[in-house]
Image (tube, rainbow, N blue to C red):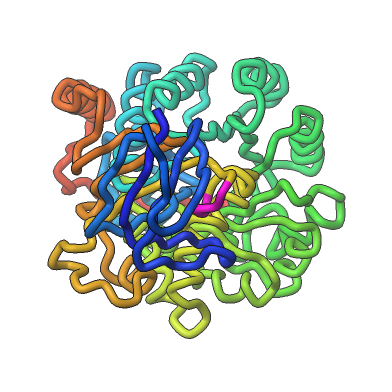
Amino acid sequence: MDKLVRGGLVVSMDPAVGTLPRADVLIEDGRIAAIGPDLDAAGAEVVDASGKIVMPGFVDTHRHTWQTAFRGLGADWTFGQYRVAVHGTLGPHYRPEDVYLGNLLGRIEALNSGVTTLLDWFHRADRPENADAAIQALRDAPGRSIFCYGAAGPDIAPEIRRVRALLPGEDMALGLRGPVMSTLDETTADVALARELDLRMSVHVHGTGGWPRGDRPIAWMHEHGLLGDRTTVVHGNGLSDDQLAMLADVGGSVSVSPDVELKMGFEPLITGRALAAGIRPSLSVDDCPSAGGDMFSAMRTALAAERGAVTTRDVLSFATVDGARTCGLGARTGSITVGKDADLVLLDAEDPAVFPVGDAIGTIVSAGHPGLVDSVFVAGEAVKRDGRLLGLDLPALRARLLESRDRIAAAAGIPVDGSWQPQEADVTR
């Protein structure tokens, strides 16, 4: 049934539409058909948005969703400790069922706080069964998800081809091993494979010194023709201005994880410098053992860390329309625009935390939180209404995730109460 979202404060993030103090959004066949006051939509289901902010769904461009069961465990960890704990100690004990539950509950958590599109940067790929479990979880969770396969091993091509046959179109991306963790030949082969299979590419780059490519990994990729407009650099801390210019020149993008980057001691955020170079950054949560899983927190940290270099409008754009563009979905989502998919979030504008709403964008960025998320629509389908997720047996899923967490922790021989402090790893290798 068509829907009419009636009488909300519409923050469209479309410059041609702007912010409308009171307007309707008409949804037909899952897409936005009209925006304006007092629309006529006979026969449509009416969604009362009075007292609500109507905004585009958030887009998270980089999250290691499989780690959800160990939420908060790494809030005090450095990056070196995180690598030891998650990849060296906990990860090897994950079974496909554990991957499935982590991805499912992590995707549900993101959706609950208004993340309608999420790129799942999956790097627990020690066996194909884990990848299959991660994909199945994304399919079973409501919302739009992109499986970014960070495959490992000497020859990833057969596995990437197998999964690509399962995930056509925009539902898959490739997580590159290089440039910081692999050779020129491996990185060249990975990029060639991504281009052959029409996959967007995402690559982790941060810090300076000690990497095989030295302090100039993006220059190294650029020199060898490995950058393009389908390349997203995750983090990018420590990249020089001329390397950001190289990425901008080819139309590449950046995914910034404000909370994790500051907590783990990365170089300063590059959001402001990326803007100056001509790149519109996107935002991401990264990992929930270290940071909260909502985009409100990411936006607020990004604004505080770079105040003066970015505005509240910039930051909300990073979390919506720029995120959609980073994922190659700019024509489908990220703003409330006629013709785009109806990926909408309704926030309670009468909650004491935000009432009265004056500058709607400033309010969302400075005072927004997951508890405000009243309703979520993905391609016009309601997945959350009146503060409750629809069609999910959350008590049963919570019990299964706790059982998974406790089994993994017991197998690894570590407590889950925060008392464990892993040793530092050498993060330069």
- Could you say which quadrant of the image residue 51 lies in? bottom left
Residue 11 vertical position relative to residue 150 in the rendered view, above or below = below
Residue 235 is at least partly visible in this image: yes
What is the magenta range?
A: 334-338
Q: Is residue 93 shown left or right of residue 31?
A: left
Residue at 47% of width from left, 49% of height from top? 59
Q: Position of residue 175 (x, y in %)?
A: 61, 38
Magenta includes 336?
Answer: yes
Residue 426 vertical position relative to residue 63 in the rendered view, above or below = below
Residue at 35% of width from left, 63% of height from top? 22
Helix, strand or loop for the magenta stretch, by majority: loop
Q: Position of residue 58 (x, y in %)?
A: 43, 51
Q: Is residue 292 shown left or right of residue 140?
A: left
**For the image shown, how many numbered marks are present on the structure?**
0
Residue 207 is at least partly visible in this image: no
- Could you say which quadrant of the image residue 16 lies in? bottom right
Residue 187 vertical position relative to residue 60 in the rendered view, above or below = above
User: Which is more toward the observer, 321 or 87?
Assistant: 321
User: Which is more toward the observer, 45 or 280?
Assistant: 45
Q: Where is residue 136 in the image (x, y as percent from the top left)?
A: 44, 19
Query: What residue occupies the far bottom of the structure in this picture?
Result: 308
Q: Is residue 52 shown left or right of residue 37?
A: left
Image quadrant for the N terminus? top left
User: Which is more toward the observer, 16 or 200?
Assistant: 16
Residue at 81% of width from left, 35% of height from top? 192
Residue at 52% of width from left, 51% of height from top? 334
Q: Where is residue 409 in the image (x, y as percent from the top left)?
A: 23, 30
